[in-house]
Image (cartoon, grey):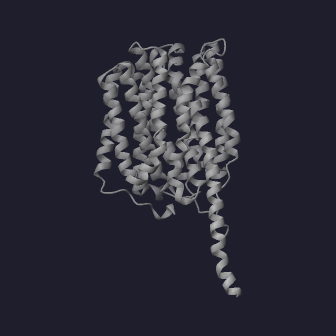
Amino acid sequence: MDRETMRHVPPAAAPKDASAEAVEGRRNLALLTICQFLYYMGMGVDLTLTAVVGLQLAPTPVLATLPLTIMGTAAMVANFSAGLLSNRFGHRRVAAGGAATAVAGGLVSMFGIRSGDFTTLCLGTGLVGLYKATGGYFRYLAADSVPKARRERAVSVLLCGGVLAAFVGPWAAEACAGLLDTEYAGSYLLVSVLAVAVIPPVLAVRDRPTDEEQPPPPPVRVRTAARTREFRTAFAVLTVAGCVMTLLMSAGPLGSRHAGHPDSAGAFIIQVHMVGMFAPSFFSGWLNTVLGPRRNAVLGSALLAAGALVGAVHSGVAAFVVALALIGVGWNFLYVAGSTFVVRCYPPHAGGRVQATVEGGTGVFITASSFVSGYLFTALGWQVLSTLAALLPLLLCLWLSAARRDPEPSDRSG
């Protein structure tokens, strides 16, 4: 009888543990989705206004996107460090620290606008760039905070937090522009407020329950991960997605203004672009599962190229809207697919080094795109720039299409 009892105890306990893990995973994902909403709200202010404000304060139009470039440079430098620090101290503490720097960055940017000092504005956006680096790790924290079966879907669910931010962010940036005595100063005060609001929910995220009898896995070496097809595909997909999206998104408001459209049109273009970036998250995770990440990335590459080509053929408001919307949707598909390949490179809680390498390495190229966007726009114009930008996703589409099948999840992914 005792044996019979012992035989039946483990099956009774297992469903309870699995249920508790699922509930905890849903709670963590909900908290992180709130963090993503607040994060992208703050980023939406900078994406909507910084190039325009930079154009007003910069000594020359060529430097109009320099504040955005400095933000990207700071993010690039911090990306690798954020991954290593997260590996040691945990994603939650690093994310909270990044939000604290954004609080300071928003206030410094506000002071720079009120004083008309372009250098101070650049310093403020640089501080916000540190926050931008840590914000990219929310998806990895989500993947580590849910049951193994939901790791890949967690990335797309998390991006749903950006949908509301896409609608509210650009509108809030414009609505707060006249809040203080200097135009746009109130918008950057909003950046600080939103960053403060991130800290409580991210610190409330709990570790996913694990088997106490099994020690945590050692960090996967970058050299080991780099030999896999998953890693190489992830790096290529995320690099192209980030470069093309950053290049055209940074130049989009400038192109709109140069074409004679009002600033409100530029804000609307970014708003639609952000909706395109995040609204597909309601189904892109499912599509990623059905098609596989490689085919999903092929579809994303085609949409990204199509958006760039729409921008190349016309400069009307409708063309800007369609172009930036398609670029946003293409980025979403590529981001979900690329992140899927990343999390396949390591088991839960063992990807700090891999994450740091992917985020830091792709950040170098993305920052370069931001840096040259102002110069290329001034030298070539919006339509030629869009034509050149279409080449990268077309090449990626051909490279991905040449692969025979989707890489299978590695044994390390669990």
Q: Residue at the far bottom: name it.
A: 1
The residue lying at 59 percent from left, 24 percent from top is 172
Instruction: Name the quarter where the N terminus is drawn.
Output: bottom right
Asked whether 227 or 294 is in front, the reply is 294
Q: Is 168 placed above or below 55 here?
A: below
Residue 406: % across, % down: 36, 56
Residue 146 visible to the viewer: yes
Asked whether 253 or 19 is in front, the reply is 19
* Residue 347 figure quarter: bottom right
Residue 64: % across, % down: 48, 19
Residue 179: % across, % down: 65, 16
Q: Is 58 placed above or below 235 here?
A: above
* Residue 123 figure quarter: top right
The residue lying at 30 percent from left, 57 percent from top is 404
Residue 366: % across, % down: 45, 36
The residue lying at 40 percent from left, 19 percent from top is 255
* Residue 214 figure quarter: bottom right
Residue 215 visible to the viewer: no
Asked whether 13 or 259 is in front, the reply is 13
389 relative position to 54: left or right: left
Q: Is 79 placed above or below 414 here?
A: above
Q: Is 341 placed above or below 244 here?
A: below
The number of discs equals 0
The residue lying at 65 percent from left, 72 percent from top is 12
